[in-house]
Amino acid sequence: MERTERFVKELENNDCEVHVVDRKSLKENLVNYIGKGSKVFYRPSALIKSLGLRDIFELTEDFHEGIYFGLSEADYGIVYSGGLVELANTREEKLPSLLPEVHVALLREENIVEDFDDLFSRLQKPLPDITFITGPSKTADIEKILVRGAHGPRKLIVFIVANEY
Amino acid sequence: MIDFRKNADRILKDPVVVNAVQRATLHALKKREETIERIPDFEDLRDRARLAKEKVIGDFENYLKLFKKNATENGFIVHEAGDAEEARNLILKILKAHGARTVVSSKSMTQEEIEINPFLESHGIKKYETDLGEFIVQVAGQRPSHITAPAIHLTRKEIARLFSEKLGMNYTEDPEEITNFARNFLRGKYFKADAGMSGANFLVADTGSFVIVENEGNARMSTTLPGVHIVVTGIEKLIPSIMDLPVFLKILAPSSTGQRQTVYTSIFSRAPEGREIHIVLIDNGRRRMLKDPILREALMCIRCGGCSNVCPIFQLVGGHAYGSVYSGPIGIIWTYAIFGHEVAKELPFASTLCGACREICPVRIDIPRILLELRRRVVEREGGRPGEKILINVWAGLMTEPFLNKIGFRVASKVQTVFKKGDKIKSLPSVLSSWTKFKDLEPLADKTFRELWKERKGS
């Protein structure tokens, strides 16, 4: 728990909106946040499939302009950087966290690790593609003024799914 | 030849640029300080990063071979280019094989180094820079003025005017709206582009991976959306192992923008089915640097831009004064090494040798030492200014021979009255004149230290 608290703090430092929820209320939280009937560009995972979101959202694996929400389950969270890690074997898997306006990420609490080394020592060759995501897309190229949503999502919302004891 | 003095003179007349550069560099330094305060082992990380780079430089060809082998096993197509021309032709060949007409590209100094854009343009291939700063600079027909903030020399007004004139944007000076316009403009390009190009921040030898760090997401787009991806990178980007990567990720962003981490770090280790990923490894003078006992240290540079931010000269004039893709203290060395003596012979003098760059460099490159050596080489080839050598010898005599020292300064303190105006020396003749061109000198005291010493001892 203590690790999770530190992780949440780092995520918030990085401009993310964070909610720690239990498994039972996850679906309800997503519905409240995203809104019934919304189109959602998603990356399938066992957790997401188990939620039965098909009857609530219009889920798709094909992106087209105008889709507002992207949904993915991050493979790891790293306390050091306050960021998420996505592993991918295909390019399609990388897109839900990149193309929509808002990226909603799920992360199971047990997948929070302290540092980069903890992640690399767990991975086996051949390596998948690895993307570290620490906050919403940003730029400060015009007069050093911070603007969110330079090319990628303007917002990053993380739902940490608490361990069940 | 790059005329630094002339460039600097021109820039110093533009208070807007001077102001913007100063604000941007000081802002990055302040953020760096704040971030490093939260990284207690930062000094240790710097040592470890340097050690990893020393390993690569000490056994370069083997690490490169290992990278090539592993990258090929990952499914990447690896090419090597000896110089810029070979690199350009290689890239063109790949693009032509895919019938590419438009290319989207994320920021790469190496691409700037080989001047790929005008070359592709002349072959009918349009390449869009997608990093916002680079995109602005491209639309303006200019060059980046800072390694991590390419458009700091332009104001929002100038950018607003530029975008509305050249791209038909509805005039707005709001940075958020301008960014949004660029976002939408480039979105269209990503999906239609025939190929994507990028640089790389790190090449990982033991896994054959390449790594790109960024904040905007444009590199992720450029590397995933088009069917072909070409990585253009210098061979010095090698690090030994994926287990070294954390160390570099922990020092790069803090030293660069002052962030703890950039928003996105992408590690590529496989070419997905149906997609070609080419890696063009560029030498272009780097092996020559490797063989040079002094210059080789500069190959450790991870391109953070920290030395630019902290350099009193850069803070004043910005990147354009250096007249090269590589600016700031380390940029002088790179420009000299890559583009040669004739182009860069003025640049090593554009430094105060204050040592701030050496202190900030995350891999502890002794930049002032290399600059001093470059000055020596320049003087050796060009000869110093007339009289300079005599003057230095006289100075050496004055400072090392007690008798000359005694007489010399006594004479000098009498002679100087000719040049004294009020209580300052405002101009000196001939070889000495450049010392008084921009500042007044304090005159020698009436009595030398030795005389004072004698007097006080006596009392």
Image: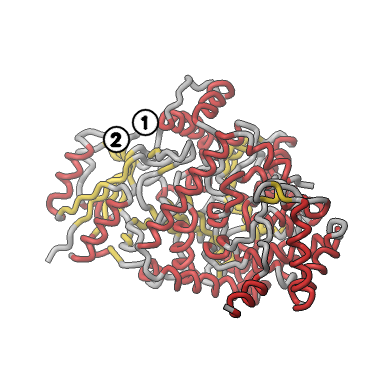
Chain holding disc 1: A
Whether residue A130 sits left or right of residue B129 in the image: it is left
- Check disc 2: other Cα within 10 Å, few if <14, some if 14-19, many if 20+: some
Residue A66 got which mark? Answer: 1
In the image, residue B275 sits, relative to residue A149, either above or below, namely: below
Residue in view at x 45 percent, y 45 percent: B217
Which residue: 51% across, 34% down? B186
Say what amino acid the circle numbered 2 marks: Lys
Q: Give the mark nearest the N terminus, 2 or 1.
A: 2
Rendered image coloring scheme: secondary structure
Residue A116's label in the rendered image is: none
Q: Are marks 2 and 1 on the same chain?
A: yes
B182 relative to B111, above or below: above
The answer to which image quadrant residue B143 occupies is top right
Three-letter residue code for mark 1: Gly
How far across and down, in percent of the image, does residue B374 sit?
74, 62
Image location (x, y in percent) of residue B335 = 71, 54
